[in-house]
Image: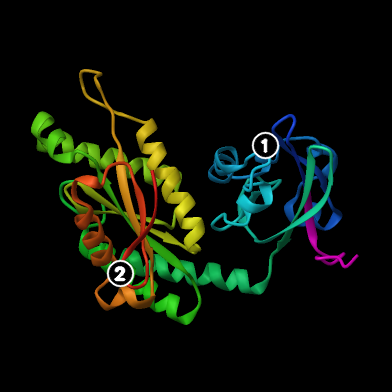
Amino acid sequence: MMLSHRGSDAVITVCQNNTDKSIEISDINKQAEEMLGLTSKKFKGKSLGKILPKRISEMLEEYVEFEDGANDVGSVLGRVQSFSVIGGDGKETSYRLKVVRADSKDDMVFFKLVLHDKMGLRKNEAVRKVIQDNFKGHESLDPDTGLPDKHSLNKDIELMDYYNNKGDVKSSFAIIQIDHYDELFAQYGRTVCHTIIKHAANICRQSLRPDDVVGSVSSKRVGVLLMDTTTEAARMTFNRLRWQIAANPYVLQDKTSVGLSVSIMFCRVGGRNNDKGVMESCIEAMDAMGANAVNVLNEVDETGKKRTSAE
């Protein structure tokens, strides 16, 4: 049988146990031990989540299907945006990931996570540092929310389009709209609605990576720019944000909880959308939905048309 990775590769072998509904580390080879600063002896039989950042662990918990589902560990990890491992020094480090399905036994399915730390990845990290410095250089804040304003977000998108065309970093942008905003405004007023927007933005910031951008688009809309991501990985991330906001109601000063739901319109940065602008494409598609935009996730394709949805 032809091996799909080399003997010199750093490999973590994991087991998806469909009976126990668990994902455990089966082995960490010598190369991975040296690269990660972890030992197989210490982590064998432990949950894979122990060496993963919270955002990736939560994605596995949410999307892996243990009962004959199409979304197994390999499928989900293959769509993760920027795979990282927490090493023996407690620091999170990104690696280029290749997932190889290995042997299966009864309800136990094995996967090999092949990790690469190459010059291309370090170059990517250097590019991202330059991008972050540029973001900060032109950033201006919305006075009501303290978030980067619409002008700043558009500048960020323009910069990302440049790097996307160079092939350095791919990204996606989304509009996150508070559902039933007019009713909330009528009941609670402008000041509370500003804090509701900040509440939703904070949930996004806590769930995303430090170099992703969360800003203000309008009184009822937050903009999110995801760095270094495929469209499919972006879909999973935005869907997770949709449910996390719904699961964390806003609490008023009198301790009353205000349940929230959001609708999300997203598209990748680059392509024909840039004829009119990525943000404008998302805004137009969201506006066109009108009252139907309640707790939905939609994508705008490169022709500017809304396609695919999840409720």
Q: Which residue is mark 2?
A: 304
Which quadrant of the figure has residue 155?
A: bottom left
At x 55% / y 70%, what residue is drawn? 124
Q: Quadrant of the N terminus?
A: bottom right
SS class, disc 1: loop
Q: Position of residue 118 (x, y in %)?
A: 68, 70
Whether the residues at callouts 1 and 2 have beta carbons within 8 Å, the answer is no
Q: Is residue 47 found inside the magenta-colored segment of the image? A: no
**SS class, disc 2:** loop
Residue 53: quadrant of the picture = top right
Task: Establish if 54 lies above or below 129.
Answer: above
> Can you name the residue that lies furthest to the bottom here?
166
Q: Which residue is mark 1?
A: 67
Q: Nearer the viewer, residue 178 or 159?
A: 178
With 183 as the anchor, is 80 left or right in this view?
right
- Count neighbours of disc 2 (C-alpha within 10 A) and say few if under 14, some if 14 to 19, many if 20 or more: many
Give the residues in magenta: 1-13
The amino acid type, in three-letter code, at marker 1 is: Glu
